[in-house]
Image (cartoon, coloured by chain):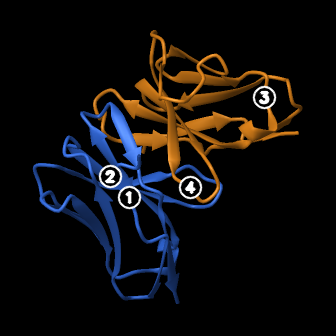
Amino acid sequence: DQQVKQNSPSLSVQEGRISILNCDYTNSMFDYFLWYKKYPAEGPTFLISISSIKDKNEDGRFTVFLNKSAKHLSLHIVPSQPGDSAVYFCAASITGNQFYFGTGTSLTVIP
Amino acid sequence: GAVVSQHPSRVICKSGTSVKIECRSLDFQATTMFWYRQFPKKSLMLMATSNEGSKATYEQGVEKDKFLINHASLTLSTLTVTSAHPEDSSFYICSASATSRAYEQYFGPGTRLTVT
């Protein structure tokens, strides 16, 4: 049973525009959420995270929004750059001991 | 930033043999290390969580006798795939969690295992 879902397997965005990647979860016990970026044949790289007590966290061009009532989080990248093209995984954690990953969204930023 | 290495990056082995994959945290101490397997076009699947000095906790459906995990020190964990079969061919990724920042894992570059 997939507890963390990324329903869009791929997304294409024009350079300079906003990229919005979405993630839904089912377990209300999740207390920490993370986004990872992954290039082919490499391990994921941590991008940004948010605690369940917050609804927004911003780091440069990356902002993560959390809507607990909807069990939904999203990653906004603005402005999008060609180097942002990668697969993005969202993940959710319970007390930092268990991590559940979504299936990933492949982002392509078109120059 | 925190660096996690894996060795080897690629390995090809014959069916029935065993393969060991090493995961090292290079510049921090990791009390917890995680082992993942990634299937094509699918998510990372957590296989097991290992804490230094104790037995690994395996996820449901993962055979602990087939995937042996040893977390010998705060900087090294090993995954041994025993009696490998072609269906074990996959991309194996480890990650390490630093003591003070347990929520943020740092991933190794992965190991591509091909069993012929």
Mark 2 belongs to which amino acid?
Answer: Leu
Mark 3 neighbour class, 10 Å CA radius: few under 14, some 14 to 19, many 20 or more: many
Q: CA distance from mark 3 to mark 2?
A: 33 Å
**Do the CB atoms of the residues marked 3 and 2 lie less than 8 Å apart?**
no
Tell me, for residue A5, which label it has, or none: 1
**Do the CB atoms of the residues marked 2 and 1 lie less than 8 Å apart?**
no
Q: CA distance from mark 1 to mark 3?
A: 31 Å
Disc 4, SS: loop
Instruction: Identify the subunit bearing mark 4.
Output: B
Mark 1 neighbour class, 10 Å CA radius: few under 14, some 14 to 19, many 20 or more: many
Mark 1 belongs to which amino acid?
Answer: Lys
Q: Residue B1 versus residue B116: which sits nearer the camera?
A: B116
What tint does the image give chain A?
Answer: blue
On the image, numbered disc 4 is attached to which residue? B42
Q: Quadrant of the C terminus of chain B?
A: top right
On the image, numbered disc 3 is attached to which residue? B84
> Does any portion of residue A59 appear in the rendered image?
no
**Do the CB atoms of the residues marked 4 and 2 lie less than 8 Å apart?**
no
Disc 3, SS: loop
Mark 3 belongs to which amino acid?
Answer: Ala
